[in-house]
Image (spheres, rainbow, N blue to C red):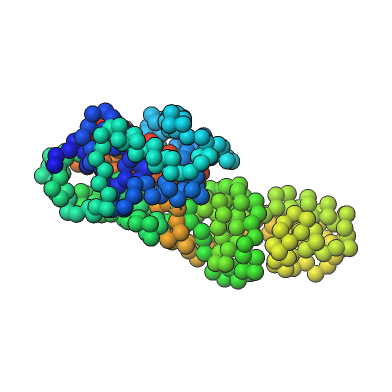
Amino acid sequence: MHYDAIILGAGGAGLLAAATAGQAGARVLLLDHAEKAGKKILISGGGRCNFTNMHTEAGCYLSENPHFAKSALSRYTQWDFLALVERHGIAWHEKTLGQLFCDGSARQIVAMLLEECARGGVEIRLSTQIGEIGHDGATFSLGGDTAPQLVIATGGPSIPKMGATGVAFDIARRFGLAVVPPRPALVPLVLGEDAQAFRDISGVSLPVTARSGGASFEEAALFTHRGLSGPAILQVSSYWQPGEAVTLDLLPQAGAALREARGRMPRSGLRAALAEHLPARLAEVMAARIGFARELGNTPDAEIDRAADMLSGLVLHPTGTEGYAKAEVTAGGVDTAALSSRTMEARSVPGLYAIGEAVDVTGWLGGYNFQWAWSSGVAAGQAL
Ligand code: FDA
């Protein structure tokens, strides 16, 4: 069968690209090896899909070219997607930090996208493997199907047990497009030796400022059996590079807090003072790590300052990440230098496009990745 466009991958990006092109009159085939469309949407946001973020702007994305995302994000914004959600009567709420979720279920978002595809007459073929892709310079062929335009929307390899693969990168390379080395992002970090010290407090969570790779995030961190997780850690994990440290500010104004405690409770030890500000088990671990020998009342300023430095700058040395099995997204991907930021079309292969997570544009935690899927999907969809 001949189509105007074949889109590979029925995730968020592929679905919205297909609907956009179909509604503009293009004959579109949307193909996926999964038995259901939008599987990551269904499990996202704890089943409620954090579908966008009110504060979306290009600065919330990592890419070799930090300007690349601007064009698509500005032409199909978070407000455009929200308007679509509202047109479908889907109730939503802001949870925190501009993160918008469905009141009901992520299934509503998938149903909405499928309805939009149906309005555009999109043919969706599930449980279908991508075989050999032929290209004679003008037409792409795939199995018995042909089209002058082919869209790579197969995402990245994060969470392989859900059917995620790195096929996007294989296809891109096959057509000569560069791929920025992919890596797990928004992913828990594994601590080596440091993990021993914190193993006993696995499950403890607290608000911190986490810093690594020049980025810093104020959100919750969670100590785990193997290392660190929680939103603040997932955020910095995208910036962390092997060999670098992660620094946690556990107690802002720690010096002032300890001096105040020294005056008020001079007979107490450091642990008691810390337990007023930190979860009790963490207070115990940090007091042991800091190792004050005396009561607070007999502790000189220099020691208070040393303790404060350790509390506001706990330096940890991750040995790695939990990998694609636990990574919410894949950073890196199809090099943006190979693509038009307006249409997502490959400069060197007319008719070939890449959108969504497959591209080297990776959002922060909090709805930014779906917004990139929507914006880049619409950018390509309008061009097909
Ligand atoms: P996506 O991965 O969604 O779709 C790719 C499609 O291609 C899939 O349908 C897949 O089956 C198909 N495919 C892959 N390989 C194939 C092959 N070899 N042959 C055929 N088909 C193939 N983001 C956010 O903004 N808010 C949130 O709440 C969350 N929550 C969240 C939770 C969890 C657990 C994960 C893992 C991820 C998130 N994310 C998120 C990230 C978000 O899910 C992700 O960035 C988008 O789904 C990316 O959309 P794409 O359409 O680009 O890829």
Q: In what quadrant of the picture does the C terminus appear?
A: top left
Residue 15: in sight, yes or no? yes
Residue at image position (58%, 63%) is 224
* 100 sits to left or right of 179: right
Q: Quadrant of residue 267?
A: bottom right
Which is nearer the eye, 332 or 25?
A: 25
Q: On screen, 313 above or below 350?
A: below
The answer to whether residue 373 is above or below residue 257 is above
Q: Is residue 77 left or right of residue 118?
A: right
Q: How many marks?
A: 0
Residue 343 visible? The answer is no
Residue 300 image offset from top left, x and y in percent: 83, 60
Residue 144 in the figure: left or right of residue 9: left
* Above or below 121: residue 272: below
Q: Nearer the viewer, residue 164 or 259?
A: 164
Name the quarter where the N terminus is drawn: top left
Task: Tell me which corner region of the image, top left, top right, bottom left or bottom right, holds residue 294.
Answer: bottom right
What residue is drawn where x is 45% and y is 50%? Answer: 43
Where residue 12 sits, quadrant-wise, is top left
Give the percent coordinates (x, y) of residue 15.
Answer: 33, 40
Q: Is residue 155 left or right of residue 254?
A: left
Residue 317: where, in percent of width, then height? 55, 63
Residue at the spot x=50%, y=54% of the render?
237
- Closer to us: 16 or 59: 16
| Residue 278, x across and y down, in percent | 72, 56
